[in-house]
Image (cartoon, rainbow, N blue to C red):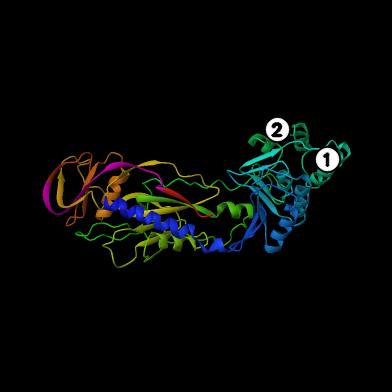
Amino acid sequence: MRKLLRSAALSAALCATTMVSPAAASEKVFGPFVVDDAKPDVIVMNGDIDVGSALNFRRALHAAPGAKLVTLNSSGGAVQMGLLMADDIHERKLATYIPKDSACLSACAYMFLAGIERKVDGKLGVHQISSDTSDLVGAQLTISDIIDVLNRFDTPVDVLSVMFKTPPNDMHLFTPEEIELYKLNRTDDGSNPSAAAGTPAALDTSLPAPNATSTTESTPQPVTPEQPHSIETTVSTPQTQAKLSPIEEFTKRPNRIAIYTGLDLFGDDISSIRASDAAECAQSCLVMNGQCKAFTFNANPKITKGPNCFLKSSAGRADGNSVAFSGRFLSGADADPPTFALGTIDPQSALFHDVDFRGGDLSPRPHSPAKTPLDCRLACVDDNRCMAFSYNYAKKQCWLKGSIGTPMPGKGIVSGFKKFQNFSPAKIISLN
């Protein structure tokens, strides 16, 4: 119970640190537009288009002169204002993006289509214009303006046809097939990214399988319980990297953290530091400009010296440890991580010193290579047949067992047994 309460307290601390951020004070709001000094290359639109929106957009552009991208979430509104803002987007060669769980409808669609680079991950919808008056001349002039502006953006005729065939009280939402067919997604060179050769594959956001290998590691002392630990690795960086587009930069930025209790993300460390709590550990990872993808914090209050926060270039491999508190940073391109099952031998509660599990061996020979108790424990975790292990320090022998043998006194032997657990994020915290 104390461990659960401690994990809950750490979660609360992490939430407080994450949600109350100096970035909030740096935001400037202009009608439906938000400019954040911490993200000067992005203008966020969230709201309807009214008669003041075009002027507010100009104010947002003035506040963010280095803007490269406009993210869109709007149900539409005033047609002429939408066209004016679309013209500004086109003239300034800005990219447009509809994030997941967002919608760009009606007049907002003009803004999306104006992007030099554009991508739909949410919903894009169009329909005919509507008017409260019977001014047919004015309506035809507005339609003429729409055609003129959209033609400047090389909008496919089929898109215009869909728009003018959909009644004003209805909304046509483009399907993924239509988005592909009409080339509504495009890169800044005008090509369709989903059809282009050499397009980077989507990031694999799943936790690595438990049979991941490592290069070097430390050996625990015989009488000391194993703590959340790290495997020091060298993170290599390519000499040259392709420049990311504004949309790729935006979608790969971390926008939330998946928090796990009792899970050690083992290996792929960039560095290890001392942190006062999990919130400080998470913040140390977050400020590394995307280099740090995950962290593990040792929540054992008895450990008062040495590093307890491990910053990682990836999620590493998953390992169960009841005093571990871990987080994975997720980007807009990542789905929420699913629940996964893992066989664990908890170093805090499932290891027994000076105890030998007699019998049940998987092999008449000791497992090789397994030079340390840690090697032996992980070898058992990785083997689906293994239910327990015993390691002899003096002989440096590891015995993997298909069943938990008879516990017998055994000086200089450490044994452990496996249990299966389901892991899912205890919380997913937004960074927005």
Residue at (84, 44) in percent of width and height? 145
Disc 2 residue type (three-letter): Asp
Residue furthest toward the left? 409
Residue in view at x 78 percent, y 34 percent: 164
The answer to whether marks 1 and 2 mark residues whose Cβ atoms lie closer than 8 Å is: no
Give the distance between the C-alpha atoms of the residues marked 1 and 2, in whole angstroms. 18 Å
Q: Main secondary structure of the magenta part?
A: strand
Q: Is residue 215 visible?
A: no
Q: Is residue 77 above or below residue 241?
A: above
Which label's residue is closer to the chain start, 1 or 2? 1
Q: Quadrant of the C terminus?
A: bottom right
Q: Amino acid at mark 1?
A: Ile
- Judged left or right of residue 216, residue 193 is right
Q: Nearer the viewer, residue 312 or 62?
A: 62
Is residue 338 in view?
A: yes
Seen in the picture, residue 270 relative to 70 is either above or below; the reply is: below
Q: Nearer the viewer, residue 154 or 241?
A: 154
In x, y percent, where is residue 132? 79, 38
In depth, the one of 247 and 238 nearer the eye is: 247
Q: Which residue is mark 1?
A: 143
* Residue that badge 2 annotates: 170
Outermost residue on the right side: it is 137
Q: Position of residue 218 (x, y in %)?
A: 30, 61
Chain part drawn in magenta = 408-426
Per the image, label 2 sits on a secondary structure element best described as loop
Residue 40 appears at what percent x and percent y? 63, 62
* Residue 279 shown left or right of residue 248 in the figure: left
